[in-house]
Amino acid sequence: MVHDLRSISRFLIVGMLGTLIDISLFAALHTWVGAPTLAANTLSYSAGIVNNFVWHRNWTFTDRPRKTTGAQFSQFAIVSLSALMLNNLIVLLLAPSFGALVAKICATGVGLGWNFLINNFWTFNTGRPVRFPKT
């Protein structure tokens, strides 16, 4: 139980960092550079993907048996890109009514749950029961 809470808290910390990168870059690209909403969202989200993979592999799920980096990143990218599609859909639906930044924040919250569940049970799981060291 303690280990589960540690994994969840680490996931949230990494997610906050990735979200900070994502939203900051989104705001810069969309507001200051004038990039279209969808392009800014895709680029900023992609920067968050790379950040989060590195941190999750080396910190959040470091105690789990590892797959090859390529295989694991491929799975992480599939999960992240499916979340990006969901994220883009929510941003496009909500932006006209609530503004792009509020829509982006709402979309980020929805994607958080999806990303944790799938990455926890697929990307960073080798198919063997996860064994945690005694703490």
Image (cartoon, rainbow, N blue to C red):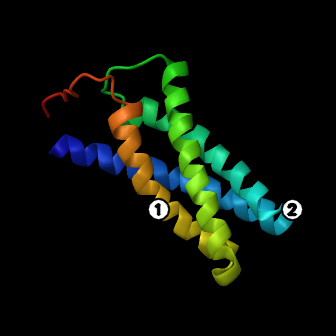
Q: Secondary structure at mark 1?
A: helix
Q: The residue under label 2 is which amino acid type?
A: Val
Name the foreground residue: 106 vs 5: 106
Q: Secondary structure at mark 2?
A: helix
Figure quadrant of residue 121 = top left
Residue 82, position as x, y percentages in the image: 55, 46
In this rendering, the count of numbered labels is 2
Q: Residue at x 39, y 47 (%)?
A: 116
Q: Is residue 111 left or right of residue 45?
A: left
- In the picture, the quarter occupied by the C terminus is top left
Q: Residue at x 19, y 30 (%)?
A: 132
Please indicate, yes or no, whether residue 72 appears anywhere in the rendered image. yes
Q: Residue at x 70, y 57 (%)?
A: 41
Residue 25, position as x, y percentages in the image: 71, 56
Q: Residue at x 31, y 26 (%)?
A: 64
- In the picture, the quarter occupied by the N terminus is top left
Q: Residues within 10 Å of mark 2 (few under 14, many from 20)?
A: few
Figure quadrant of residue 92 = bottom right
The label shown at residue 36 is none
In the picture shown, does residue 69 fall above or below 77? above
Q: Is residue 117 left or right of residue 83?
A: left
Verify CB contact (< 8 Å) between mark 1 and mark 2: no
What residue would you read off at disc 1? 110
What residue would you read off at disc 2? 33
